[in-house]
Image: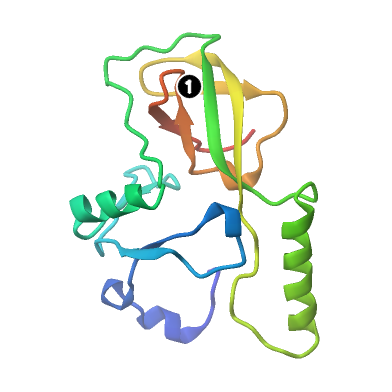
Amino acid sequence: NYYPQPWLEKVTQEHIRYSVDVYDQKALGKSDPLATFGLNPYPIHHPNNMDLAIVHLKSEEASLKQMKSLGVHTLYLADNDTTFDKGDEVFFEGFEITEEHYEAMEQVNDAFEKDKSGKKSDNDTRMFIPYTTAGKLIFANPNRFLATTETTLPEGVCGGPVIDEAGRACGVVEGIV
C-alpha cells in the first residue's frame, strides 16, 4: 500500500479528473500551461498489468487541432504490417532531470530551499527535460523487441514512445534493463 491514508480507500473513479497540460518548451518551469485539455474519465489499462494506459481527449478532434496550433507534435502509429529486424535503428523519447541542465536544476534547488525554509508547498517542483536518444534492435518479433543504447536510459523514458526510422510510434518503453 503506497499511500496508507484511510481516506484514500473511499476514492473512486467518480472522484478523479484527468487532464493534459501543454507548456511552452522555451519557458519550462517559468510559465503557466498554454492550455489544459480534459481527458475522458475511463482510461484503458494494459490487460497484463503493465504500466501502460490509453486515454482519449474529450472533444478529441477539436483538442488535437488546438494542440497542433500550439506546436504539439503528433506521433502516428507504425502500420501493423511493419516488420522489424535485428540492427534496425529506433529512437526513444521521454524526460530526464540531470545536472547538465544547470538552469533547470537551479530552479529545482531554489524551490527546495524555499520549501525547507518553512514555506510548505504541495506543488511538484521537479523539472522534466525532454530527452531523445537512438538505439539498435538486438531482438525483434511481431509482438515485442529489445534494443540497446549507448547509455542507460533515464527513468523518465519508461512509458515513452519508441519511434521507428519513418518517424512513427512503433512501441512503448516497458522497462530499462
Q: Give residue 162's position: percent from left, percent from top.
A: 47, 30
Counting from the top left corner in percent of width and height, residue 3 is at 54, 74
Colour convention = rainbow
Give the residue number, with chain letter if any, for mark 1.
Answer: 145
Give the residue at x 37% y 35%: 75
Q: Residue at x 50, y 36 (%)?
A: 173
Q: Position of residue 126 (x, y in %)?
A: 65, 63
Image quadrant where residue 123 sits: bottom right
Q: Quadrant of the C terminus?
A: top right
Q: Is residue 100 left or right of residue 138?
A: right
Q: Amino acid at mark 1?
A: Phe
Q: Residue at x 33, y 71 (%)?
A: 17
Taking depth in this image into account, of 55 and 69 the one nearest to the observer is 69
Q: Pick whichever, 107 or 175, lies toward us.
A: 107
Q: Which residue is at the far bottom? A: 118
Where residue 39 appears, as percent x and y from the top left, is: 29, 61
Q: Residue at x 41, y 19 (%)?
A: 166
Secondary structure beneath dot 1 equals strand
**What is the crowding at mark 1: few (fewer than 14 residues within 10 Å), some, or many (at least 20)?**
some
Horizontal placement of 177 versus 100: left or right?
left
